[in-house]
Image: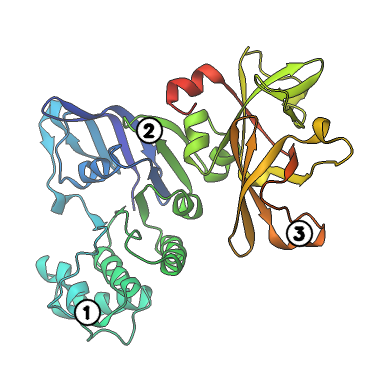
Amino acid sequence: MAGVELREVSRSFGRHTVMEGLSLAVRDGECFTFLGPSGCGKTVVLRLIAGFERLSGGAISIGARVVSDPARKVHAPPERRNVGVVFQDYAVWPHKTVYENVVYPLVIRKVAKGEAAERAAQTIRDVGLSGLEARLPYQLSGGQQQRVALARALVSNPEVMLLDEPLSNLDANLREEMRFEIKDLQRRTGVTILYVTHDQEVALAISDRMAVLDARGRVRQVGAPDTIYENPGDSFVFSFLGVANFIPVERRDGLDFVRGTAVPLALPPADGGARPAADRLVAGCRPTDIALSPASSGDAERHAAGVLKRAVFLGASIDCRIDAGGTELRVLQDVGAAERAGLVLREGEPVAIRLHDVKWFDAAALAKEGLR
C-alpha cells in the first residue's frame, strides 16, 4: 500500500480556477475524507489523483512515485497508477455477472486464468457476495451493486482506493450499513482510502482523518473527526459539520443577553475562565447543547428567554424552533428524557434556555463567511 502527497496542486479550466495551492499528505493505510459543499472541487481532486485529469500546477506522488508534475512533464496514465476507483453511480456492467464484473480488470491485465479466478473469488468473499457470483446487476440490490463496484476496484490489489460519493444513491439504512462495510474493508485489507463526500455523518463515521474544504476549494481544517468536531478551526467548519446555532451576545451588568434585546441567556463559563476579547461576540452551539424548560410563571420576564414557535416529533427526539429576541434557535429534545422530567412543551409557550456548551466566534468573521 502507499500514501498520497499533494504539493501545491492547482487545476484550472480556462479562466475558471477550481483549486490553487492545495497541499496535504495522506498516510499509508488510512481512510482520508475530503468533505465539502457541492462544487468545491472534491471530485476534481480524486480525478487528478487517478490521472483522469491533468494538473495545471504542482505535483502528486503515490508512495515514492511522482505520478503528476507538469513542470517536469510527468503524467502517468490511470492504468499505471495502481489505484482503484469506485464511482457514485457504481458503473457496473449490466450485461456481466457479478463474477464477470469483478474478474474483468484481471482479464485486461492478462493475469493467468487460474490466478484471476482465485483472486476474483476471494475478493467476492471479502465483500460479502458469496453465492451471488452468477447474478446480473439488475438482480441485485443497490448495496449489493455497490459491493460489486468495491470488489472490482479491490481485485487488482491497488495501493490506493478512490471513492467518489459511493453511498449517495442508497437509502438511509443501506448508507449506514455500507459505511461500516467500507471501514471494515479498509481495516482488513490495509488499503489507503481517499473518500469524497458532502455528507458530514459519513465523513465523521469512516475517517481516520479528514480535510474540510470550503466552496472555493480551500482546505479550512485537517484532522481527526472528533478533533475537528469538538474544536472547529473557524465558523465555516463549525457550521458545515452539522446544524449550528449562532447567537449574538452582549454582556450588561454582569448578565448575558441576546444582542440588542432584553432576552437573557444562561451561558456556561468560557474555557480558561475568560472570553475572547472581540467586541462583538457570537455564541455557537449545537441543537443538543441547549436545554429548554417552561418559563417561571411567577417571574416570566426574568427567566423567559424565548418562545417555542414549532415542535416537530422525530421519533426519539423533538425538533424545536425557538424565537429568542428575533434569533431563531434549533433545539433537539430527547423525547424520553423530556417526558420523564415533565418538560414536554407546547407551541407558543415561553421557555427558558440554558446552554451547556458554546464555541465563541467574532461577528465580523461570521459576516465575512455569509453566516450572519
Q: Which residue is mark 2?
A: 214
Q: Nearer the viewer, residue 98 or 188?
A: 98
Query: Of helix, strand and loop, which one carries label 2?
Result: loop
Q: How many marks?
A: 3
Mark 1 or 3: in front is 3
* 10 displayed left or right of 256: left
Name which residue type carries label 2.
Asp
Label located before the other in sequence (1 or 2): 1
Q: Classify mark 3: residues with Cα within 10 Å, few (<14), some (14-19) or many (20+).
A: few
Query: For this rendering, which residue is in front, 59 or 1?
Result: 59
Q: In this picture, is 167 found above or below 15?
A: below
Image-quadrant location for residue 6:
top left
The secondary element bearing badge 3 is classed as helix
Q: Dividing the picture into quarters, in which one does residue 119 lie?
A: bottom left
Please, what is the three-letter code of the amino acid marked with disc 3?
Ala
Residue 195, horizontal then vertical, whole percent: 36, 50
Mark 2 or 3: the one toward you: 3
Instruction: State the mark number for residue 346.
Output: none
Residue at 37% across / 52% down in the picture? 192
Q: Position of residue 74 (x, y in %)?
A: 13, 35
Residue 101 to residue 162: above or below: below
Mark 2 crowdedness (10 Å alpha carbons): few <14, some 14-19, many ≥20? many
Q: CA distance from mark 1 to mark 2?
A: 38 Å
Label 1 with label 3: CB-CB less than 8 Å: no
Rendered location of residue 339, percent (x, y):
77, 61
Instruction: Name the residue carrying label 1.
Output: 138
Q: Residue 254 versus residue 227: which sits nearer the camera?
A: 254
Compared across the picture, whether 179 is left or right of 155 comes to: right
Q: Earlier in the sequence, mark 2 or mark 3?
A: 2
Give the label on residue 337, or none.
Answer: 3
- Determine crowd level at label 1: few under 14, some 14-19, many 20+ residues with C-alpha closer than 10 A: few
Marks 1 and 3, how far apart at CA: 45 Å
